[in-house]
Image: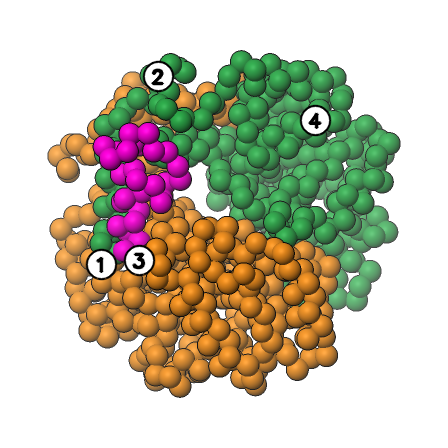
Chain colours: A green, B orange
Amino acid sequence: MSDKRPPGAPERANTAVGERADALCDAALAGDRRSLARLLTAVENRTPLAEAALRRLYPMAGRAQLIGITGPPGAGKSTLVAALIAELRRADRPVAVVAVDPSSPITGGAVLGDRVRMQAYAADPDVFIRSMASRGHSGGLSSATTAAAAVFDAVGFDVVLIETVGTGQSEVEVAATADTTVVVEAPEMGDEIQAIKAGLLEVADLIVVNKGDKPGAHRTAGQLRAMLTGATPRGARLGWPTPKEPEILVATAATGEGVAELLAAIDRHRNTTRGSDGDAVRIVRAEAQVWAVLSDRLHEQLRLIEGPMDGAAQGALAGTETPAGELIRAVAAHQLDPYAAADCLLALFMGRGSLLD
Amino acid sequence: MSDKRPPGAPERANTAVGERADALCDAALAGDRRSLARLLTAVENRTPLAEAALRRLYPMAGRAQLIGITGPPGAGKSTLVAALIAELRRADRPVAVVAVDPSSPITGGAVLGDRVRMQAYAADPDVFIRSMASRGHSGGLSSATTAAAAVFDAVGFDVVLIETVGTGQSEVEVAATADTTVVVEAPEMGDEIQAIKAGLLEVADLIVVNKGDKPGAHRTAGQLRAMLTGATPRGARLGWPTPKEPEILVATAATGEGVAELLAAIDRHRNTTRGSDGDAVRIVRAEAQVWAVLSDRLHEQLRLIEGPMDGAAQGALAGTETPAGELIRAVAAHQLDPYAAADCLLALFMGRGSLLD
């Protein structure tokens, strides 16, 4: 492959990278946390090492239970995740957390206290909490978190909790790639939060009204039950066996009340959906992962389409003297519509036909 | 093209669709609001009619000023948008709004009061407010809003405000496709909102602290100023001329105080960034649009890759008896890694080579 690579093409996987990936995988599989952390960083940044490592680890994954935890700001997701960790550890189950962090990698990083939370379990080798920035994932945030979950899965974490602030489309999708998606609500929130809450319900396999000790909690649960009566649950829309309506629970994460029941409901949900005809949610997840890789590959190829003007030019799609860059500039100037430009690029791409040479 | 289309392939644009698109475009260009609304619905749902209409309208667009308005829940974005509309109408500028609605199309739809806001301007032909659901955009939310903005632009709206709840990656990206992105903040919010605020700053061309009459407003502005000192503004990262730091203003949308100044700052920002070497933000926007179309085309092609088992099968990528479906299922079962599956699909795709026949 490498001898036919166009000049300037990024190396996809060379031997040195493969060896480093193997060494890190071996160490992580043997329980080395620093190696695990480095693998996760590679996965988050989509480096060539990540590809080599994931190809190695992917066949070892597939056993872990993925639980998505999402909800509006202020619903108490972090507290609930902490309570779930405690509950899972009581049952001696190893647990990893991928916490999607809405703050920016540019302006500062995690302010959600994940570092602090991590410290509480620093001495427990069977707990690993990892923050992941929500920005800058070319292949999509859900592909990055799914890949991180596969790493945790391969190295033996039995449960992977994926925590997102459920206020954005991508963030909600992330939680929805899990085997079971838990939407955390809280009593009494403002109007806009109200709208966000409504938007979340469509991905919920289970709903937990947190802060159950607050006055409005049971009323909120009742309202949610009324909203959901007659709604088609996510599983049914995706065509997999599923309870008729999402179960609605009340819990108080801060005291731990109701958390064991929540975990039991999560396990019950998982047992309902899997089995019969293969896990439909896992097929959806696999499709998203494959598409993310395809999309990366195609982007890379399109960036490499070179023009007669400058045979060695390579750079971002726009702003270069490649045909791709010219097409983009013509679209920006409204001299060409995006459909015509896309069809030109496809023609160039198909004509090139050298991707897998 | 049609005679070579594989069986079951969706019709991309036939004559009847083209004629209906032309009729709607003619009517919308002549000022008919119902036709405009129907075009926007087609664009939101990415129907074949939308493609035909956009191809027709795109060359007529490119003049409107796109202003992104984003911010955390509760910052008062809707009130600010209303105040901006009032200010723009005072200057006799036609204004359209694309309001991205975080609530779900399944569980209920707009609860943000856009319908109510719309009614206030029902008698003004130069104001048009359109809600758009944040879910279910295969080509990406920002491509849907950009396409809607192009329609408004083509039919003569001078300013298009794009309003999103700035709490999700996609939603922030949407606002960031505008010529000028305004981040709305408000004094005194909870911890998690604090993190979201920090995440928003990276896309801000301008920051407005709303609810300027509240005690903490000027302190919040000061804190933001401190956070941003030394940070590289978005424009500089994208390589276009830009002020050194985002301007920070204080306004009270509810009373209108500071709104004229905000609009002046927006215009000032636009004049700084455009000119010199073409609008860099427009090139970024064009690239995203072209990629969205490409991505749609490729998805469609991949779904059509047919196997020897069932020559007529066509359906979603997974769950079908096509090679694509089989590959996805193998990935779901962890018998194959996503990279290997993607490379197989690419090989099938390249081998097919019939896309533009």
Asked whether the residues under marks 1 and 3 belong to the same chain, the reply is yes
**Magenta part mainly helix, strand or loop?**
loop
Residue B136 to residue A239: above or below: below
Amino acid at pointer 4: Leu
The disc, 1 or 3, on the residue closer to the chain's N-terminal end is: 3
x%, y% of residue B298? 33, 36
Separation of residues labelled 4 and 1 (CA atoms): 52 Å
Amino acid at the residue labelled 1: Pro
Q: Which residues are magenta?
A: A305-333
Q: Which mark is residue A36?
A: 4
Give the chain letter at badge 4: A
Front residue (pair B1, A109): A109
Q: CA distance from mark 3 to mark 2?
A: 44 Å
Chain to which mark 3 belongs: B
Reading the image, the residue beneath label 2 is A4
- Is the C-beta separation of discs 3 and 2 under 8 Å? no
